[in-house]
Image (cartoon, rainbow, N blue to C red):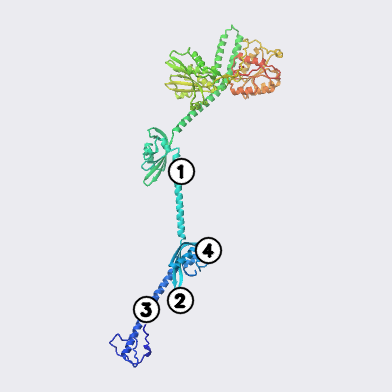
Amino acid sequence: MTRPDLSFLFRSAQPPAPESTDRKHAPPPGIPERRQPGRPSDAVGALIAELRSSQAELEAQNKVLRFSQAAAESASERFETLFSSVPLALMVLDEHDMVVQANSMAHRSFQPTEADRPLVALMPFVQAADAERVRAAFDAARAGGSAEVTEVVFLTGEQARITGDLHIAFIETPQADGGPPAPQFLCAVIDQGPLLAERRALQDSAATLKERNAQILASERRLEAVINSALDAIICVDAQHRITVFNPTAAALFACPQEDALGSPLERFLPDAAQAMALSQLTTQAVLGEVTARTANGRDLAVEVSVSFESQGEGTSATVFARDLTGRKKAEAHRNELEAQLRESHKMQAVGTMAGGIAHDFNNILGAILGNVELAKADAGAESPVLESLLEIQKAGRRARDLVRQILTFSRNEPPQRKAVSVQEAVNDTVRLLRVTVPPAVDVQVRIDPDVPDVLADPTQVEQALLNLCTNAIHALGDQRGTVLLQAVCAQPDPRICERLGIPPGDYVCLRVSDNGPGMDAATQQRIFEPFFTTKPVGQGTGLGLAVVHGVMRTHGGAVDVYSVPGEGSSFTLYFPGTSHCVPDEGDGGAFCIPTSMPVAAVPPPPAPPSESPSSAPPQATGDAEATERQRHVMYVDDDQALVFLVQRLLRRRGYRVSGFTDPHEAAQALRRDPQGYDLVVTDYNMPGYCGVDLVREAKRIRPGLPVALASGYVTAEIEREALAEGASALIHKPNDVEELCATVQRLAHGSGDTDGSGSAGAASTPRADGRHG
């Protein structure tokens, strides 16, 4: 380095030398030329030139230094600006973990409030679990210049924390005193909290998506299970109406395998599908109701169809729900049939109740007519000219009585007098009666299964039912040539037939009467069992034949069925419950079955009829001396005055003392006044505001041993059981013959062994519904 120029210290007042032509050694402008005394001028000039050159170099160096200093100061300012404003927590640590410098982001992150721990060192903020990793990273940075630790947790407060990546750079800072540079660490903390939260959110979203996919898969499986187990046929079609889903019910309904149906057009099974799919432009759902579908084998069937439409990008798909209506239609038809049967049953019950009520009053009238005829015959004598008229009146009255009994056979449910009846004999007896009245053009044929067992029935009623059916068949043929066929077979009716007829399933003996006549339409079949309904001309039928048959079968626990087609004839079938080893029960008119090894008690014969003479005195009971010395006193109670007057005349002619009452209350009061003054009480069952059973009960309460008879034209099994339970000695069916009534009165009035009321009527036998006693 050249020495500094000090020539200004030797400045003199000498004039300046002339300008040298040598520009190299001329002094710089502004600097006076100095000359040393005693030296030559060239040497001084050279020195001055050298000094000036050194001065110029120093000035250039100063300019470079000033530029460098300005650049360094600018770089320092930029670093400080970047250090302080970068959105990262930056810290400069010394080798003792002391924070030499930290930017504002670091202070905000590690000391969010004044109450938090100050940022003077880094390691106190590091979570204990991550401290070892951080120390290892500082050692690695010292050795290699840089290091990185991921997901370090910094505890900035009691609840606050930072999870971030720590980046470490090793630097050496020169010392101002010229000593060795100090080691320092530049640390940057990159907060990974948002990224971790996003990662967790993504992981949660992935788990949620996985769970959602599992739910969707489970829903699809459930939907598939629902579709496959649905009772309705479910068919899904695409925008081109091609089948994409065909559940097993649809495969069974349309008789087509699923693999064969997929891809087929919907019109293959629903011909009107195009019309239904046109509704997709108007609605999202449509109920088509009942339509005609076609199976794979070409069979038509009725189905109920509804459609749901789904809009898609390429068009509209649809889901078709089809329900088979075959079972419903059958059930509706069966229900309608049962409803019609129920209405018919109610109608027949109402008609029967009405017939029973009419018969009660009509019986009283017929009883008065027949009784007065008997009295008139006795008064007229054998040679009287009015006897013939009286006999005709009696004949007509008995026909009317039989007609009423037919009505009651239909209307009441009292058990018949059953016993084992041979079907062969019943059919043969019926045919034998028909032979004399069958026209020559009608052929009567009989076909009886040899294995047909006996039936438990009333033989008279069985023959009456067969005779009515055969007579109707012959009348249906008229003058035309035809055939009447009587069949007897064993059968087990179909359960539906049993349900329709109201009989329990089991073995039955079927008696069928068929003809090939004109038949009947449905309207006629619905009314054929109604009393007084007939299709015959006036005067040729009463309309009671089939009503009686219906009543007979009902009382026997069976049923009558009819099948008829117009132009093809008619067939009536009687279903009798089969039985074996059965004997009649003479106690209550029913029947019971006994083993073959048990002895059967002999049935006592009915008592001998009384004398025909109306003036003969009533026979006296043997062994009762007091009874033979006085006249028997009979109390007769009936709300019909004519019948009371008749019975009084009849019994008084037979030698009885008779007290008649039309008011049961007066009769009860008379009995209370003189309990021992009466030998027999005969009361009507049905009286206005009073029941004959009540009078029976009252009479037994007043005098327990007094014989009491109950008379009615409408005796049912319930009435019989109720009367017997209250102590009635007999049941008298009205209208009865005079001799039958007198025989019953004679047996009860003279058969008692206790006339003073101390005991019961020992001679009274078990009564029967028809007034006879066994």
Residue under pointer 4: 157
- Left or right: residue 161 compared with residue 274: right
State if disc 2 and disc 1 touch (CB < 8 Å): no
Q: Is mark 2 on a helix, strand or loop?
A: loop
Q: Nearer the viewer, residue 117 or 284?
A: 117
**Disc on the earlier residue, 4 or 1:** 4
Q: What element carries label 4?
A: loop
Residue under pointer 1: 222
Q: What is the distance, in whole Å, between disc 1 and disc 2 at their CAs?
A: 82 Å
Q: What element carries label 3?
A: helix
Quick check: 262 above or below 726? Answer: below
Residue under pointer 3: 63
How far from the left and from the top, in percent, is residue 152?
48, 62
State if disc 1 and disc 3 touch (CB < 8 Å): no
Q: What residue type is labelled 3?
A: Lys
**Disc on the earlier residue, 1 or 2:** 2
Q: What residue type is labelled 4?
A: Gly
Which quarter shows the N terminus? bottom left
| Comparing labels 1 and 2, the label whose residue is closer to the camera | 2
- Left or right: residue 225 compared with residue 608: left
Residue 623 found in image quarter: top right
